[in-house]
Image (cartoon, grey):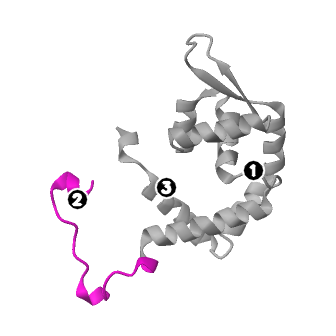
Amino acid sequence: MTAKDTDQQPPEVPASQGGYHVTEQVGHLLRKAYQRHLSIFQTNASDPDLTSVQFVTLCALHDLGPSSQVELVKATSVDQATIRGIVDRLKVRGLVNLSKDEADGRKVVISLLPKGEALLQEMYPRAYHISEETVARLNPAERVALLYLLRKIADDESDEQ
């Protein structure tokens, strides 16, 4: 719920906190952590042209099977316009195929091709390594706590309704 939803003004920063420091804010720290993770991903990916968002899209297709763009948006949490571009780039690379849905000719179905499946199989061990390297500075309890807290932050209450 936002301040707008409740017609309340955002809380003022207490003077004891010394004002607003962007480098100490959750959004800034999440962005820095994500940038570090992306750097680790690009350094360790088996294919230098594969992005992390393309990888998650291929993973979703592997897990779900042939899917519509709407289904991919839901599975990946990537917006409609972005997923369209990702799918186009994966198609050009011969990793996915697009076809018309037999029941609804207006609906496009995206399928993983053998070349895409082979890339995924090559990437899975590297993906585990990428995740491990991303959290290497954390002890086991901190890793569990981080994943728990990230899920809690990322959880959209509207998904539960």
Tell me what residue is drawn at x 84 percent, y 48 percent: 122
Quarter of the picture containing the C terminus is top left
Tell me what residue is drawn at x 63 percent, y 70 percent: 140
- Answer above or below: position of 137 versus 159: below
Count of numbered tags: 3
The front one of 19 and 149 is 19
Mark 2 highlights which residue?
3
Q: Secondary structure at mark 2?
A: helix
Which quarter of the picture shows residue 8?
Answer: bottom left
For badge 3, the amino acid type reads Arg
Query: Is-magenta flag for residue 9?
Result: yes
x and y percentages locating residue 129 in the rendered image: 76, 61
- Answer above or below: position of 133 versus 124: below
**Mark 1 or mark 3, which is nearer to you?**
1
Q: Which residues are magenta?
A: 1-24
Tell me what residue is drawn at x 80 percent, y 34 percent: 94
Mark 1 highlights which residue?
50
Spatial separation of the CA atoms under disc 3 and disc 2: 23 Å
- Answer above or below: position of 50 versus 103: below
x and y percentages locating residue 50 in the rendered image: 75, 50
The front one of 160 and 140 is 160
Q: Secondary structure at mark 3?
A: helix
As drawn, which residue projects farthest toward the top?
103
Q: Residues within 10 Å of mark 1 (few under 14, many from 20)?
A: some
Instruction: Tell me if 111 is positioned left or right of 21 in this view.
Output: right
Whether the residues at callouts 1 and 2 have beta carbons within 8 Å, the answer is no
